[in-house]
Amino acid sequence: MKNFVFESPTKIIFGKGTESVIGEEVKKYGKKVLLHYGGGSIKKSGLYDRVIDSLKAAEIEYVELSGVQPNPRLSLVEKGIELCRKENVGYILAVGGGSVIDSAKAIAVGVPYSQSVWDFFEGKATPQEILPLGVILTIPATGSEASNSCVITNEEGWYKRGIRTDLVRPKLAIMNPELTFTLPPFQTACGIVDIMSHVMERYFTNEKNVDLTDGLCEAALKTVIKNAPIVLKDPEDYAARAEIMWTGTIAHNELLGTGRVGDWASHKIEHEVSGIYDVAHGAGLAVILPAWMKYVYKHDINQFAQFAVRVWGVAEDEENLEKAALEGIKKMEEFFQSIGMPITLQELNIPNDRFEEMAEKCVQTPTKTVGNFVELGKTDVLNILHLAV
Ligand code: NZQ
Ligand code: ZN
């Protein structure tokens, strides 16, 4: 097990009706907030009105910035930074999913920084200060409500890039599973795949003697696999929504990655896909993950066989670990299909004429590679994209 520092300071308030305390919680940090949200789902569901009521009851002033798109854009982040400076905002409140939260995180690190916030995403600077940030989560998926990362798309060149720093972990996350009842099946399923991917990115590691986190990863995956069909059949099943929502946070707050080095190549490749084609992150992952697995499983057949047996219930076969490993990957694909996810680029209407460009952008790293479980160069990324067709 590797040395590690684990700090997950986000205060989590979980359960029915919890959004009603937002005003009192914000009051601890400031008098004026930026209320940041997406395309209107929070208005349709009535959540917006409840948030405003709570802010007003606590005598909190607010300004609003809506219109965050899935795969959040740099231009809106820049608008938010200007607005916060002009209005002297002291707290950012994100109400929505990963896109809204990430947009809010970027605004929060951008306000105290005098130059372009994109510097952080290009690795030219590291954020040193941040405005306090709170979240009311409406879709369990990215784990951004407690994660140390933030992913933004720059429309100039369609670069989708992330930053990782503990500074961007929100101070507060309010998580009411009832708020997820209104999610369409497609978004529910995208979230489920994203949650599973955050676990699997950590599960496939070269680190040995990580039994505890192996077991936690397996439990997280099995919890989601069990509850996914329940919420797709009955979107208002509170118990199942709650299981998925809490797993989504645990999957990405780094607890499952303690003492091990995760892979993250699938995420990097998917970010190139959604950066250019603007597909939902979870749907992109449902396509890229199986292709990545087929490409790398021979690197550690034991771990892939363990994954197949413990997570997917494949019969143990010590004589033929490869057969078990491949069966596990197949079961995962079948599961993705069963919840309505694509498993090929074709199903996402993505042609193969920009693979070269995606592979090139993907390995624009200091080492010219992506991934830690297996280090992949440009040709490997191209091969994986071809396997995903
Ligand atoms: O914009 P509105 O109208 O709110 O609609 C949203 C959006 O269209 C809708 N939605 C959200 N909650 C709803 C709802 N519709 C009905 N009822 C509700 N309760 O769902 C759509 C998708 O929302 P979005 O926020 O884009 O989804 P998600 O949470 O999957 O976020 C995806 C973004 O996060 C990044 C992804 O790359 C992508 O850009 N990620 C962020 C990470 C992080 N910061 O830690 C890690 C992830 O790996 C990921 O890369
Ligand atoms: Zn993800």
Image (tube, grey):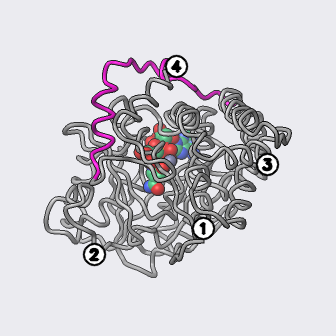
Q: Which comes sooner in the sequence, label 1 or label 2?
A: 2
* Towards the viewer: 355 or 84: 355
Q: Which residues are magenta?
A: 339-365
Mark 4 lies on residue = 347
Closer mark to the observer between disc 1 and disc 2: 1
In what element is the residue under mark 2? loop
Left or right for 33, reference 4? left
> For the residue marked with disc 4, what is the amino acid?
Glu
**Residue pictured at 43% horizontal, 59% vertical:** 94
Q: Is mark 3 within 8 Å of ligand 2?
A: no
Mark 2 lies on residue = 128
Q: Which comes sooner in the sequence, label 3 or label 2?
A: 2
* Towards the viewer: 141 or 298: 298
Q: Which comes sooner in the sequence, label 4 or label 3?
A: 3
**Disc sitting over residue 216 in the figure:** none
Confirm whether residue 298 shows in the render. Answer: yes
Question: In 3D space, how far apart are the residues under numbered discs 2 and 4 (Cα atoms)?
Answer: 42 Å
Q: Residues within 10 Å of mark 3 (few under 14, many from 20)?
A: some
Q: How many marks?
A: 4
Question: In 3D space, how far apart are the residues under numbered discs 1 and 3 (Cα atoms)?
Answer: 20 Å
Q: Residues within 10 Å of mark 4 (few under 14, many from 20)?
A: few
> For the residue marked with disc 2, what is the amino acid?
Gln
Mark 3 lies on residue = 310
Please tell me whether residue 74 belongs to the stretch shown in magenta.
Answer: no
Question: In 3D space, how far apart are the residues under numbered discs 1 and 2 (Cα atoms)?
Answer: 24 Å
> Are the residues flagged by discs 4 and 3 in contact, CB closer than 8 Å?
no
In what element is the residue under mark 1? helix
